[in-house]
Amino acid sequence: MKLYDITIEYQTEPLGLAVKRPRFSWKLASGQNDTVQKAYQVIVSNDDLLVWDSGKVESDQSILIEYAGADLEDETNYQVKITVEDNHGEIAEAVTQFTTGIFNPQDFVADMIGHNFDASVTAPPIFKKSFTLDKAVDKATVYVTSQGVYELELNGQRVGQDYLAPGWTSYNKRLQYQIYDVTEALTENNELAVTVGQGWYAGIMGFEMKNHHYGDRVGAFLQLNICYEDGRKEIIVTDETWSVETGAIKSSEIYLGETIDSYQPQILKGNVLVLPFDKTTLVAQENEPVRITERREVVADFIAPNGERLLDFGQNMTGWVELKVKGKAGQKLVVEHAEVLDKDGNFYKETLRQAVSVDTYICDGTEQVFRPHFTFHGFRYIRITGFEDVNANFTACVLHSDMKQTGTFTTSNPKINQLQSNIRWGQRGNFLDVPTDCPQRDERLGWTGDAQVFSWTAAYNYNVAPFFSKWMKDVAADSSLEKGVPHVVPDILGSYSSSAWSDVAVVVPWVVYQVYGDLRVLEDSWTVMHEWVDYIANHAEDNGLWMSGFQYGDWLALDKEESADRTGATDKYLIANAYYLYVTDLVRQTAQLLGKKKEATTYQQLYDRVLAAFQDEYYTKTGRIVSETQTGAILSLYFNLARPNDRGRILKTLVTNIENHKNHLSTGFVGTPYINHVLSENGAHDIAGTLLMREDYPSWLYAVNMGATTIWERWNSIKPDGTFDESGMNSLNHYAYGSIGDWMYRKVAGINQTSPGYKTFVIKPLFIKGLDEVTATLETPYGEISSHWICRDSQIIIDVTVPVNTTAQLYLPEKDGFITLGSGQYHYEYETNTDLALLRFSLESTFGDILEQPLAVAMFNQMAPGMLDNPMIDMARGMTLVEVLGAAPDARPLYEAVINELNKQEF
Ligand code: BGC
C-alpha cells in the first residue's frame, strides 16, 4: 500500500498558507483489491517542536482532515507526517510540508500606493524601488497585490508564472494577494518594479463600456519579508519612498487590447501617493492562479478573399498571441482577434461587439518578443497588419485558472468526442479567475446563471473546488438579505435576484460539497445560502409562491425564440418557484449536515408549504401541467415537484413536445442541463440518446458539424447557410449548453457519486445508439474512477476501476441487479441479449439519420426508385421511422431491410 498525492487545502506543499485550520488529504494505492483505510495518524511539527499529533485514529477518513493543533505561526515551515494502516494490516507513511503566510491582514505594514498622473494618462504606471542587501539571505517572501492588474519584476525578471494577478474579486470587500519565494532572485543591488494596468478595477467593464467600477486610479501593494542567514529580518514595503513612471505600454484595457511602443516610449515621471486602503480586505489567493496552460502554433497562414492576411490557430480559446519578431525601428504591427470567419472566409469580429481586442506593437529594431500584459482575448483567428517585409513567429498562449484536469470522456464517435472537447474548451475559456459567460465580447462577467447550470459538468472536467470556493466568497460578499444575490459576481451591474441565476448561492456550494466532500464550503456559504431562500420567502405571496420581480426565465429557449425578451415560453414564475423549492430543499439538507436542527425543520416546513402551493398553481387535478413546455415538464420531474401520480402524464407531455419538435429539444439555459437526465431516468433513455446524436439544428452536434471548437451561446449562432445570428448577442464561447457534459459522464459512462467525494458511487452505463464504445475517467478525491464499455459484435465488455477506500455499485447493462465492488480493477465480458445492432439503427431512428448513410440512400433508390425525390421526404427527415410508418404503413418491410443492412456495416 502506498500513500500519494498528499494535498493541504487542495495544494501540494503550499507556500503562504493563511488558513488557520488547514485540511490534509491523501490518496492510497494498493496491489490488493478491497482495500480500505483502517486508521490514520497525522503529525505536524516545526523542526523539533511537535505542534499536532492526531494520535492513531481508527477511521476511514482520508480526505480533508482538519488540523487541530496549536495556533499556527506566521511565515513558518511545518513538516507533516502521515501514517496509514489498511484493512490488510499494511502500513504506509509519507511526509509533506507547508509554509504559512500572514494570518492577520492587519499585520501587513505596506501601504497601497498610487500616482498623481493626469487622468488622461492611459499608460500603466510602474512603481519602482531600489535597495541593496549586504548580508546573505536565508529566505525572502514577497506578498503583492494591486488595485488593477499587475506584473512584478525583480531585477528585470518576472516574478512567478501567473498572469492577470491579483484576479477579480469584490475588491472593496476582498482583495487577493499573491505570494512568491524570491530568495534566489535577490542579489546585492536590487530593483522591484510593479506595473499596474487598469484591469477589472479601473478599466472598462460591462456592455455599457463604463470604467472605474472600483476606483479611477490603480495602486500597488507589496511587502517583501527578508530573513537573513544571521536570523535578522528586514521588510521592504510599498510606501512614499517608491518612485513611479510610465513605460513602453501606452495603454491596456481588457476589452480593447494593448499598445506597446518600444521605439519611442513616453516615460512620464510622477509622484507616489499613499492611498487610503482597508487592509482587512486582504486575502491570500486560494484558487489556482491564471497561467499559460498551453501554447499553440499557427495551423494556417493565408490571405482571405478580401485580401487580408489571417492566421488560424485551429481552436477557439482565451489568451493572447506572443509574437517573436525583428521589425524595423518604428515599424507598427497590429494583431486583431476574432472567433470565426464569415461564410465567405473573411475575418468576422461581430461576436466581440464593442470589445475591439486589438494589440499594437511598435518595434525598436532589435529582435523582440511581444505579448500583451493586462488584457486577454477570445479568439481562434488573428488578422495581422504591418507585417510586410518581416518574419514573425506567432504563438497562441492559452490562459485560464490553472485547475487540475480531473475528467476525460472519449467514445467511438468522433463527433461526440469533438463535443466533449468543445465543452472542455468552453470551461478553459471561461474559468479565468471568475466563471465568465464568454471571453471575447464586452461582457466577460461572472454571470451567475451560466455558472450555476454548468457547475456539475465543470466538476467532472476539472477540480473546481478552489476555484468555486474562492468565487463563492465573492457571491456571499456581494449578496444581502435585502437585495438578494446579484446576476453577476463580482457585482458591477447592480442587478439582483433572478431564479436560476441567483440560485448559484445554493447550488454551487452544494456541488462542491458533493464532489469533493468539502463541508467547509457549506459552512462558509451558509449565510448566503439561507439568506437567498429567506429573500425569496420575504418576497412571496400569501400562499408562499414567488410571483414578482425580474426573471431571466428559460433564457434563450427556442420555444419563444422570436420574443424580444429572450426568456422562452415556460412560465417564468413556474421556473422561479421550481428553483425556489429545489434550493430550499438543499438549504434544509445543508442545515442538517451542519447540525442546525431548528433551521432544518424550518426549511422543511417552508418546503412543504411551497410545494403544496406549487402543485395547486401549476398542475390541474388531472395532472396537466400549466406550462406545457419541455422545460416546464423537465423541472417538474427533475426537481420531483409533480404529484407522484402525475409523473407519467408529465413525462408524456415532455415526449410529445419533443416529438412535436420533430425529435428536437427547444430548451434554454434552464431546461438544457436536465432534459436528458429526465428522459434517461424515466424510461425514455432512447430519446435522450436521439437528442444527443442529432446532427441538425437545434442540437449539440449541429454546432460540431458547423465546425465549432467551443460551445456556442445559441443553438443557431451560425446558421446552416453560414450566416450568423444577428441579435447582437452571439458568442461562440459560452459554456451553458455544455451542461450536457454532466449527463454524458453520469448516464452514458455511468459514473455517479452517491456520497460526498465519491466515497461511494454507482457505475451504471446506459448504451445509446450510435456509440459502441465509451471510456471515461474521473480523478476523485480518493483516486481515479474509470468506466469503459464496448457494445459491439454481439458482445458487451465492461472495465471499471474503483479507487482504494471507496465502494462502488456496478450495474452491468442487460443484467439484473448490481454488484458491490471494493477497490480494484474489474473486467466483464458477456454476450448481449438484445440484437445489439439495433442499438445503432432501429425504427426509433430518425429518417434524417438514416438518410445520412449513403448505403441507405442507394438501397432506397434501388428498392423504391423515385421515393426520395418526393417533396414529403424533407418533412419526414425529423421524424422517427415509427412516425413515418404511421403515415405509410406499407413501407415497413422496406425500412426493416434498410436498417438490417445498415446495422451490418461498421461506421
Ligand atoms: C450573458 C449571459 C447571461 C445573460 C443573462 C448575457 O448577456 O452573456 O450568458 O446569463 O446575459 O441575461
Image (spheres, helix red, strand yellow):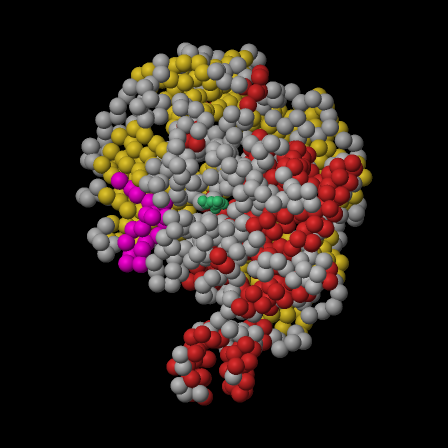
714 displayed left or right of 748: left
Judge left or right: residue 753 versus residue 873. Answer: right
- Magenta region: 334-352
Residue 257 x %, y %: 34, 36
In the rendered structure, the answer to whether residue 193 lies left or right of residue 552 reads left
Quarter residue 479 falls in: top right
Q: Is residue 97 above or below residue 356?
A: above
- Could you tell me residue 234's position as x and y percent? 51, 13
Q: Is residue 836 above or below residue 173?
A: below
- Is residue 519 at all visible to an observer of this figure? yes
Which sits in the foreground, 350 or 631?
Answer: 631
At 43% across and 32% down in the image, what residue appears?
A: 200
Quarter of the figure with residue 294: top left
Residue 426 percent coordinates (x, y): 47, 49
Residue 98 in the image: state x and y as whole percent: 62, 29
Q: In front: 648, or 523? A: 648
**Residue at coordinates 44% horizontally, 49% vertically from top-left?**
733
Question: Does 216 lie within the magenta span?
Answer: no
Looking at this view, name the residue that lies furthest to the front: 542
Asked if 328 appears above or below 394 in the picture, the reply is above
Viewer-closest of 880 and 379:
880
Q: Which residue: 42% across, 37% down?
A: 206
